[in-house]
Image: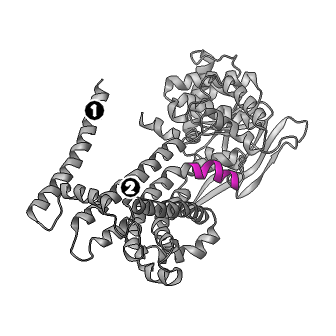
């Protein structure tokens, strides 16, 4: 796989869960590639199994069948940004962002320097001593992004990272994330159920169907950045995806 | 401005409730002559300073009780958190010892007094430490275990994606998340601890507040001396709880922020 620029390759990944009512198939033979430094959006209706797919890539859940292969040059470790932030309330911003480096056994000075670099990158300089409970939702997610970057992994998985934010903050954070990404290249897999967000952010969009999820369609928005959600091309694509998403339900 | 006023109101309410308690006490003593009044209790306290019981000044009794609860509390906190953590993170340990713990937990600490005295004697503090230790540790174990086993899975997931091993997860995530619950267990444990202190000292001690209370039943009933003991226990336990709250606030600066 080396040299093809493919960071993660999923082949026929299936997953189902047992519960009281019986067996629910969640993922149905999903195959996809994630390429180096691309911004891949996985778009799908609510509850379609997008999170399960990310969990499987992050090695937090096991697929029933199928294979996941990482680029041999990649550590196979992924950074993760959660919808509900998952910041540790008992640690201030600096300590939260430092944590992945601490777990690796990095020296204090190196830890702080790296953490400060990412705190500055997400625009939170001056807030490093603040506790999460003092921050707004948007600021919390900036910390979440800084922490994922500080983990040093070249792949970052984002599970509806702006899903808990109000609309205004959501737009700001979308621009912020694109800015961060332009400063430091990473391979990003971004899960959302919001079509406009998908078109605004994604280099490539994979549309998933409802449970059991399959990859229905792939879109590569040929739109100049910064994208405008009022441009005719944007709206055409939005209408097309909306139509397909309705079918996918 | 209005916030300051509100705090003042609560402050006044607290003082009023203490005054009400004193008033009820005073009224009860007025109706029933065998009950010492608050005034008689204060007077008895000063007489106790002038005429020490068993030749020991009242400070010796207070310090004896304080030493016993603090030593037992420290030991029970360390052991209780350790045991609670083991129950919380080692399933095999939990399956082996949780039934034993559950059987022993509801036994009142005082029920152990005869055996403990038989083994460790009346002289020296060992027997008292053990009784009080039993009284304190149960609540700490329960709270620590409950809090650790109920850690939000999101935190554990986050720790894993950040590359934490089991030990790092415990030190940086599970334990700090449980500090408030552990302190709540310590406070609950302290109240059973004071119960155990007084009971153990009433039965097997030559000094301590419980010993003073016990002396109030010797010869003619001396309810004023009993009340001196009751007030001393109340004041000492308030002091210990207050110090514990200060430590908790120092350890958990992030909790202060939630209130604001």
Q: Which mark is residue A36?
A: none
Mark 2 burial class by Cα count in 10 Å: few <14, some 14-19, many 20+: some
Q: Is residue B172 magenta?
A: yes
Relative to B88, residue A88 above or below: above
> Which residue bears the numbered disc 1?
B6
> Looking at the rendered structure, which numbered label has been put on residue B236?
2
Q: Check the image and tell me how it is coloured.
A: one colour
> Residue at 22% of width from left, 56% of height from top?
B43
Q: Is residue B205 magenta?
A: no
* Magenta stretch in the rendered image: B167-176
Q: Is residue A98 above or below residue B78?
A: above
Camera-nearest label, 1 or 2: 2
Subunit of label 2: B
Same chain letter for marks 1 and 2: yes
Q: Chain of mark 1?
A: B
Work out whether residue B111 or residue A236 is closer to the camera in this orientation and state it: B111
Residue B246: image location, x then y, percent = 47, 44
Q: Position of residue A6 (x, y in %)?
A: 83, 38
Q: Is residue B47 left or right of residue B185?
A: left
Image coords of residue B144 (percent x, y): 53, 59
Identify the residue at image location x=61%, y=22%. Answer: A126
């Amino acid at each position: 796989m080396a040299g093809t620029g493919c960071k993660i390759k999923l082949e026929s990944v299936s997953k189902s869960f047992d519960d009281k009512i019986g067996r629910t198939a969640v993922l149905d033979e999903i195959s996809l590639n994630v390429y180096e430094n691309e911004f891949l959006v996985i778009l799908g209706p609510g509850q379609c199994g997008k999170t399960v797919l990310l969990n499987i890539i992050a090695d937090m859940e096991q697929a029933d069948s199928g294979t996941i292969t990482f680029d041999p040059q990649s550590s196979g470790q992924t950074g993760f940004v959660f919808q509900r932030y998952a910041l540790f309330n008992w640690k201030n911003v600096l300590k939260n962002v430092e944590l992945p480096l601490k777990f690796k056994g990095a020296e204090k000075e190196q830890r702080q320097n790296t953490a400060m670099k990412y705190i500055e990158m997400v625009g939170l300089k001056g807030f490093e001593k603040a506790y999460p409970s003092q921050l707004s939702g948007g600021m919390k997610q900036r910390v979440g992004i800084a922490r994922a970057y500080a983990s040093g992994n070249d792949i970052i998985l984002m599970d509806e990272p702006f899903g808990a934010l109000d609309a205004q903050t959501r737009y700001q954070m979308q621009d912020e994330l694109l800015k961060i990404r332009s400063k430091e290249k990473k391979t990003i897999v971004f899960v959302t159920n919001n079509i406009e967000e998908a078109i605004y952010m994604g280099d490539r969009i994979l549309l998933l169907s409802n449970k059991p999820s399959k990859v229905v369609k792939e879109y590569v928005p040929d739109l100049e950045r910064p994208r405008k959600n009022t441009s005719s091309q944007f709206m055409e694509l939005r209408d097309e995806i909306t139509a397909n998403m309705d079918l996918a339900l | 401005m209005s916030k300051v006023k509100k705090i003042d109101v609560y402050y006044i309410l607290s003082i009023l409730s203490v005054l009400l308690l004193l008033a009820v006490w005073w009224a009860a003593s007025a109706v029933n002559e065998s009950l010492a009044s608050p005034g008689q209790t204060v007077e008895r306290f000063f007489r106790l300073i002038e005429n020490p019981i068993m030749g020991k000044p009242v400070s010796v009794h207070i310090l004896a009780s304080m030493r016993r609860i603090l030593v037992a509390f420290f030991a029970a906190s360390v052991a209780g958190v350790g045991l609670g953590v083991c129950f919380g993170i080692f399933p095999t340990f939990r399956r082996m010892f949780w039934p034993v713990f559950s059987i022993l937990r509801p036994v009142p600490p005082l029920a152990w007094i005869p055996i403990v005295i038989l083994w460790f004697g009346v002289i020296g503090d060992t027997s008292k430490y053990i009784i009080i230790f039993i009284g304190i540790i149960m609540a700490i174990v329960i709270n620590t275990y409950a809090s650790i086993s109920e850690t939000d899975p999101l935190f554990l997931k986050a720790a894993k994606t950040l590359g934490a091993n089991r030990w790092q997860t415990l030190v940086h995530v599970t334990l700090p998340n449980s500090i408030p619950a552990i302190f709540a267990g310590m406070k609950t444990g302290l109240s059973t601890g004071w119960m155990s202190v007084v009971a153990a000292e009433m039965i097997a001690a030559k000094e301590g507040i419980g010993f003073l209370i016990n002396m109030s039943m010797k010869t003619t009933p001396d309810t004023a001396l009993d009340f001196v003991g009751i007030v001393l226990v109340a004041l000492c336990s308030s002091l210990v709880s207050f110090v514990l709250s200060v430590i908790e606030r120092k350890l958990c600066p992030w909790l202060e922020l939630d209130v604001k």
